[in-house]
DNA sequence: GTTCTAGAAC
DNA sequence: GTTCTAGAAC
C-alpha cells in the first residue's frame, strides 16, 4: 500500500494578496496550511502513540499539538468541549493538531470537522483500523493508562465502541481520509505526517481503505457489488480527487466539490467495472444479445386497474433497483405502447435520479408481443398483466399476449395455476409451437396480477394505497424472482458442460446462498411436519419460486365457492400446511404426528406445541378456512370436532392427571383450514416464545369451543369482534392475572403459580381436568 | 406459523 | 457485554 502516492507536495507559498500585507493578512496567508487530523480508533488502537510519534518525530518544521481527551482536564480525562477549545487555540496559533480521542461515531467527529471549516483548515481523518482483537489485548494489558481505561473494563468498552463505529466519509467534510489497517500502515502514516513541512499539504481523497471502505461501498452499490465485479482492493489513491497543484492550498471540500468527487469516483469505478466485464464477463453481453437474461414487462395495475402512476413508478424503480443489486447479468425492460406514456417518463426520470444502470434497466416503446420483430429487442421472458382467472381476453396487454401466443399459452397456463391473487405471479413456459415463441423467441410468459383501484374490477381496494402499494411491490418482486428463477435454470443448462457450481448458478452467489437457505427452511418445515416430499411440494432450488407462486391460494378447484374462489384473506405459502394435510391425509398416514383421521377431521400433534400437550383437530371440509367461514350448517361438524378433542384430552389426562385442558379456536388463525386447539394449561413449552403465542391462548383471541358452538346456535355465526389487537396486550398470568414484563419472567411465574383459574373459565365448561371429567362423565 | 436479525433495554 | 422484542422475510 502506498500511502504516499499522490505525493506530499513541497509547496511554494501561494500568491499573497497584493494589498496591505498587514499582520492580519499574513495570518490569513499562513492559514490553510495548518491541518487538523482527527484520529479515529477504539482504545488500544494506538492513537496516542501515533500522535506522539508524529509530534516528537516531526522533521519538517511543522508544529504538532496533540489534543487528548484522556488528559485534557489537568492530566485527567476531560470533555469534548475542552478538546474543541484546545484544538481551536492551537490552530489559531499556527499549529497543526491531532485530535486524540476515539471519534468512532460520526456525531462525535462532527464538531471537529465544523471547527476546521470555521478556521479554514484542512481536516483529515486517520482511521486506525486494526483488528478488534489487537485493540482489546492492548487496551486490556496496558497499565497506568491516562484515561484509566485498562483491564477487563477496556475489553468491554472496546467491543461496545466498535459496534457503533461509523467509518469516516468525505461527505462529513474531511478533505482526506486515510485508513491504517496494520502497524506497517501506521508507520507509513506517521512518516507521512512527520515529514510534512509547514507549507506542505497532502492530496485529498480516500487512501488505504480496503474495498469494504465506505466510499467504495457507496459507489459499488450504484454500479455493482465488489465481489461480483472483482474490483481489487483499492490500494493507493484510486480516487485522485482534488489534485493538488504544487503550492495550491487545499480547501475543505464544499458540497459541490464533494459531489464532483463522487461522480468522478463513480466514473473511475465504472471504468474499472466495464473493463472487468469486457475481460471476464463476456457471457453477459452474449446473454443480453440472445435475450435469455432480459425480461420485458408492462407497467402493472396502472392501466385498467387505475393505480396511481406516481406511486406505481416509485414502486417500479424501487423494486428494479433492489433486484438489479441482487443479481448480475440480468436486464429489465419496461415496455409501453405509447411514446407519450406517462408511466415511462416517470420511471425514466426516477431511475435516472437513483442512478440505476441504464444498460440493465430501461424503458421501451413498442408492442410487448412484437419486441423482436418490430423493435429489434430480444427478450426471452415477457410479463403479462393478467387477470385473476388467468383467462384470455379483456383488453390491453393480457388480450395482446394471449392473442399473440395462441391457444398453447392457455393450456400451458392451466397446467401451472388456476387463479392468481393480487400481488403474485406465475411463470409459464411457452410451448415451442406458440407463435410468440417461434416468431419472437419468447420462452416464458410470467402472468402477474397487481392491485386493483378500479371499482368495476375484482378485488377493488377502494383507494387503500397502503395495501395497494404493498401488493404492487409484491407483484413486481414476485415477477422478478420468477424471472431470476428462469434465468438460473437457463444458465444452469447453458453452463452445465463446465460443471462448476458457480457457472451452473449463473454466478449469482449471494442469491444461491439464499435459495439454499430457503430450501433448508422448506425441507425443515416438511421434515417437522413429517410430510413426505411429493412432486407437488418438493422443495426445488430452481423452481422454488415458481412452484410457490404456481400453487397459490387455491390448489383445488371448487374451493370456497360461496365467495367466488378468492377470499378476502390471503394465505402465505407457509400457511397452507394444514390445508394440504386435511385435503390429502392419506399422503401423511405414516407420520407420527397424526393421531387420528376420519372423513371429517384429522387430529394432529401441533408441531410447535405451546404446552406439554397441544393437539389440533383439523376439519377436512374444503373452503372452511377459519372461524369466520363457519355457519349453522357446520354445527354438527363443530360438535364432532369438539368431541374428538375432549376424547383426546381425556386420553392425555389418563397419562397425567395434573393437566388441565382448554379447547378453542383462534379468532384469526395464522394457518389456513379450520382447526380446533386442545391445549394443556401448563404452557410449559420451549415453542412458546413470544407475546403473540401467549396472548393467542390466554386472551379473548382464544374462543372456547363451547362458546363458539353456542354462539353459532344462537346467531348463525361466530363473532369476530376480538381482533388481533389483543395479541399485543401486556403479558398476564392466565391464572392469577398478574402482569409480567417479558416472556421469560412470565414463564417462570406460571411454572409456579398455583392460583385457581379465573371464575369465568371455571363457570363455563371451558376447562377439562381429571375432576371435571369425572363429574361430567364426558 | 417459524426464523432471522436489528436495535432497544438492561 | 447480554437479553429480549418486534418486524421482516419466508
Image: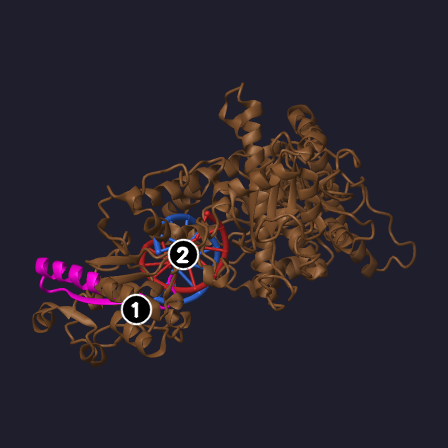
Chain colours: A brown, B blue, C red
In the depicted view, which residue is nearer to us: A583 or A498?
Answer: A583
The residue at 16%/76% (across/down) is A756
**Left-right relation of A104 to A21:** left
**Left-right relation of A162 to A608:** right
In the depicted view, which residue is nearer to us: A423 or A755?
Answer: A423
x then y, percent, for residue A85: 61, 64
**Left-right relation of C8 to A252:** left
In the depicted view, which residue is nearer to us: A372 or A521?
Answer: A372
Q: Say which quadrant the N terminus of chain A sits in.
A: top right
Subunit of label 1:
A
Does the image show residue A135?
Answer: yes
Q: Which is more foreground, mark 1 or mark 2?
A: 1
Label 1 crowding class (10 Å Cα cut-off): few <14, some 14-19, many 20+? Answer: some
On whether disc 1 and disc 2 are found on a single subunit, the reply is yes
Q: How many marks?
A: 2
- Nearer-N-terminus badge (1/2): 2
Give the labeled residue for mark 1: A635
x then y, percent, for residue C6: 43, 64
Q: Is residue A667 magenta?
A: yes
Give, as a single range, the part of the protein colored magenta: A643-669
Residue at the far right in the pictured view: A19
Q: Quadrant of residue A466?
A: bottom right
Q: Quadrant of residue A559?
A: bottom left
x then y, percent, for residue A464: 60, 67
* C-alpha span from label 1 to label 2: 75 Å
Give the labeled residue for mark 2: A148
Q: Quadrant of residue A695?
A: bottom left
Secondary element at tag 1:
helix
Amino acid at each position: 500500500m502506498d500511502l504516499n502516492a499522490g505525493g506530499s507536495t513541497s509547496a511554494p507559498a501561494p500568491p499573497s494578496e497584493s494589498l496591505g500585507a498587514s499582520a492580519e493578512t499574513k495570518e490569513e496567508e499562513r492559514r490553510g496550511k495548518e491541518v487538523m487530523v482527527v484520529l479515529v480508533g477504539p482504545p488500544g488502537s494506538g492513537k496516542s502513540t501515533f500522535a506522539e510519534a508524529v509530534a516528537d518525530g516531526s522533521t519538517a518544521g511543522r508544529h504538532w499539538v496533540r489534543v487528548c481527551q484522556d488528559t485534557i482536564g489537568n492530566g485527567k480525562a476531560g470533555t469534548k468541549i475542552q478538546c474543541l477549545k484546545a484544538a481551536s487555540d492551537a490552530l489559531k496559533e499556527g499549529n497543526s493538531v491531532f485530535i486524540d480521542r476515539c471519534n468512532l461515531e460520526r456525531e462525535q467527529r462532527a464538531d471537529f470537522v465544523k471547527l476546521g471549516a470555521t478556521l479554514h483548515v484542512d481536516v483529515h481523518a486517520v482511521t486506525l483500523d486494526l483488528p478488534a482483537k489487537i485493540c482489546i489485548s492492548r487496551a486490556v494489558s496496558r497499565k497506568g493508562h491516562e484515561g484509566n481505561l485498562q483491564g477487563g473494563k477496556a475489553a468491554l468498552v472496546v467491543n461496545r465502541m466498535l459496534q457503533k463505529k461509523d467509518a469516516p466519509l468525505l461527505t462529513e467534510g474531511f478533505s482526506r481520509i486515510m485508513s491504517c489497517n496494520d502497524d506497517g500502515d501506521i508507520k507509513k502514516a506517521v512518516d507521512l505526517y512527520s515529514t510534512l513541512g509547514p507549507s506542505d499539504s497532502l492530496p485529498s481523497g480516500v487512501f488505504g481503505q480496503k474495498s469494504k471502505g465506505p466510499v467504495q461501498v457507496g459507489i459499488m452499490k450504484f454500479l455493482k457489488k465488489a465481489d461480483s465485479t472483482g474490483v481489487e482492493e483499492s490500494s493507493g489513491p484510486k480516487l485522485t480527487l482534488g489534485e493538488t497543484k504544487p503550492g495550491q492550498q487545499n480547501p475543505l471540500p464544499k458540497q459541490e466539490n464533494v459531489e464532483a468527487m463522487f461522480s468522478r469516483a463513480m466514473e473511475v469505478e465504472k471504468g474499472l467495472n466495464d473493463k472487468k466485464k469486457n475481460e471476464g464477463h463476456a457471457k453477459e453481453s452474449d446473454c443480453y444479445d440472445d435475450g435469455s437474461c432480459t425480461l420485458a414487462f408492462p407497467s402493472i395495475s396502472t392501466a385498467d386497474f387505475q393505480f396511481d402512476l406516481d406511486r406505481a413508478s416509485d414502486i417500479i424503480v424501487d423494486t428494479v433497483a433492489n433486484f438489479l443489486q441482487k443479481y448480475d447479468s440480468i436486464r429489465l425492460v419496461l415496455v409501453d405502447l405509447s411514446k407519450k406514456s406517462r408511466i415511462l417518463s416517470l420511471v425514466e426520470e426516477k431511475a435516472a435520479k437513483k442512478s440505476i444502470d441504464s444498460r440493465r434497466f430501461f424503458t421501451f416503446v413498442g408492442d410487448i408481443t412484437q419486441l423482436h420483430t418490430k423493435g429489434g429487442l430480444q427478450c426471452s421472458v415477457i410479463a403479462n398483466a393478467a387477470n385473476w382467472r388467468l383467462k384470455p381476453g379483456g383488453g390491453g396487454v393480457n388480450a395482446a399476449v394471449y392473442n399473440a401466443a395462441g391457444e398453447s399459452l392457455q393450456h400451458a397456463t392451466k397446467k401451472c395455476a388456476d387463479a392468481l391473487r393480487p400481488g403474485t405471479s406465475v411463470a409459464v413456459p411457452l410451448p415451442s409451437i406458440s407463435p410468440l415463441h417461434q416468431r419472437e423467441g419468447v420462452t416464458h410468459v410470467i402472468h402477474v396480477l397487481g392491485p386493483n383501484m378500479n371499482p368495476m374490477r375484482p378485488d377493488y381496494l377502494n383507494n387503500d394505497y397502503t395495501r395497494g402499494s404493498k401488493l404492487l411491490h409484491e407483484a413486481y418482486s414476485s415477477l422478478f424472482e420468477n424471472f431470476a428463477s428462469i434465468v438460473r435454470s437457463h444458465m444452469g443448462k447453458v453452463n452445465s458442460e463446465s460443471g462448476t457450481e458457480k457457472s451452473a448458478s449463473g454466478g449469482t452467489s449471494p442469491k444461491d446462498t439464499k435459495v439454499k437457505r430457503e430450501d433448508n427452511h422448506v425441507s425443515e418445515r416438511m421434515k417437522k411436519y413429517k410430510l413426505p416430499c411429493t412432486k407437488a411440494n418438493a422443495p426445488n432450488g430452481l423452481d422454488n419460486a415458481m412452484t410457490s407462486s404456481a400453487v397459490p391460494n387455491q390448489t383445488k378447484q371448487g374451493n370456497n365457492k360461496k365467495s367466488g374462489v378468492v377470499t378476502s384473506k390471503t394465505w402465505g405459502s407457509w400457511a397452507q400446511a394444514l390445508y394440504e394435510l386435511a385435503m390429502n391425509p392419506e399422503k401423511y398416514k405414516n407420520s407420527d404426528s397424526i393421531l387420528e383421521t376420519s372423513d371429517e377431521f384429522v387430529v394432529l400433534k401441533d408441531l410447535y406445541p405451546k404446552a406439554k400437550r397441544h393437539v389440533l383437530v383439523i376439519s377436512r371440509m374444503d373452503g372452511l378456512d377459519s372461524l369466520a367461514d363457519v355457519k349453522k350448517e357446520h354445527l354438527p361438524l363443530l360438535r364432532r370436532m369438539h368431541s374428538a378433542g375432549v376424547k383426546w384430552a381425556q386420553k392425555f389426562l389418563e397419562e397425567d392427571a395434573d393437566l388441565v385442558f382448554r379447547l378453542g379456536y383462534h379468532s384469526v388463525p395464522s394457518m389456513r383450514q379450520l382447526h380446533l386447539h386442545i391445549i394443556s394449561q401448563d404452557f410449559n413449552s420451549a415453542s412458546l416464545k413470544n407475546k403473540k403465542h401467549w396472548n393467542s391462548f390466554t386472551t379473548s383471541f382464544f374462543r372456547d369451543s363451547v362458546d363458539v358452538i353456542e354462539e353459532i346456535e344462537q346467531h348463525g355465526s361466530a363473532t369476530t369482534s376480538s381482533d388481533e389487537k389483543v395479541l399485543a396486550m401486556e403479558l398476564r398470568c392466565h391464572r392469577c392475572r398478574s402482569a409480567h414484563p417479558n416472556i421469560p419472567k412470565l414463564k417462570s411465574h406460571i411454572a409456579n403459580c398455583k392460583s385457581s383459574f379465573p371464575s369465568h373459565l371455571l363457570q363455563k365448561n371451558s376447562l377439562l381436568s381429571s375432576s371435571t371429567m369425572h363429574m361430567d362423565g364426558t
